Image (cartoon, rainbow, N blue to C red):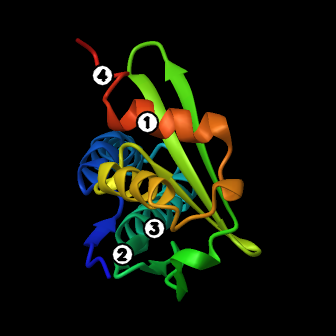
Amino acid sequence: MNSEIFEVKYPKKDLVDFFLLYSIFVIVNILMFAFDFNVRLSVLLAVHLILIAFAMVYVTLMFKVSIENNTFHVRTRIGKKYSFDLNDITKIRCTKKLRPRLGPQFSLLIYIGDREIELYSEMNGFDQMASLLLDKINAKEINESRISKSTKEELIKYSKRAYDPK
């Protein structure tokens, strides 16, 4: 039995980017309040900004998929936890979006019955997950009928770094 142990989760640097943009709105809100522009509007904006910041931080920190011995442990964005075995996977899709300035973005959709997990190439541990799934497919631990030919090809290209800028 393999003993792969790793996690896939959002990078914390996403929060830094968010708070840099967020700080602009906070500064505008402070200026609105300081210059008595419209006190009610600035209070309403402040409440919305606090709620948005809380939601963004909560979602980023809560979501996690950890893999240990062919068992996936998932904590959703709202904090619900569940586990499933490698054999419970009903379908895997790998998609690629070409972004002109940022390069391609890959996403993995893993379906388990009526649930689905969506993972993005920007997430920490995505490379390991793609390699693990490809290894399990090649080792026939995941039935090939659960993955399309194009998905398998995209996983192979991703693992070979075919889309990395030279």
Q: Which residue is drawn at 26% across and 79% down?
A: 3
Report how far apart the C-alphas of labels 2 and 3 lie in the structure: 16 Å
* Whether residue 117 is situated above or below residue 95 in the rendered picture: below
93 vs 137, nearest the viewer: 137
**Residue closer to the observer: 160 or 94:** 160
Kindly identify the amino acid type of the residue bearing the numbered disc 3. Answer: Val
**4 or 3: tag closer to the N-terminus:** 3
Q: Mark 2 points at which residue?
A: 66
Residue at screen point 47% across, 40% down: 155
Q: What quarter of the picture does the N terminus occupy?
A: bottom left
**The quarter of the displayed image where residue 8 is located:** bottom left
Q: Which of marks 1 and 3 is nearer the N terminus?
A: 3
Question: Given the image, on which type of amino acid does mark 2 rest?
Answer: Ser
User: Circle 3 sits on which residue?
Assistant: 59
- Residue 61 at x, y = what percent? 35, 70
Q: Distance between the residues labelled 4 and 3?
A: 29 Å
Q: Earlier in the sequence, mark 1 or mark 4?
A: 1
Residue located beneath label 1 in the image: 156
Give the label, 4 or 3, closer to the camera: 4
Q: Where is residue 23 in the image (x, y as percent from the top left)?
A: 30, 45
- What label does residue 164 carry, if any? 4
Q: Nearer the viewer, residue 153 or 37?
A: 153
Helix, strand or loop at label 3? It is helix
Disc 1 and disc 4: Cα gap in Å?
13 Å
Q: Is mark 4 on a helix, strand or loop?
A: loop
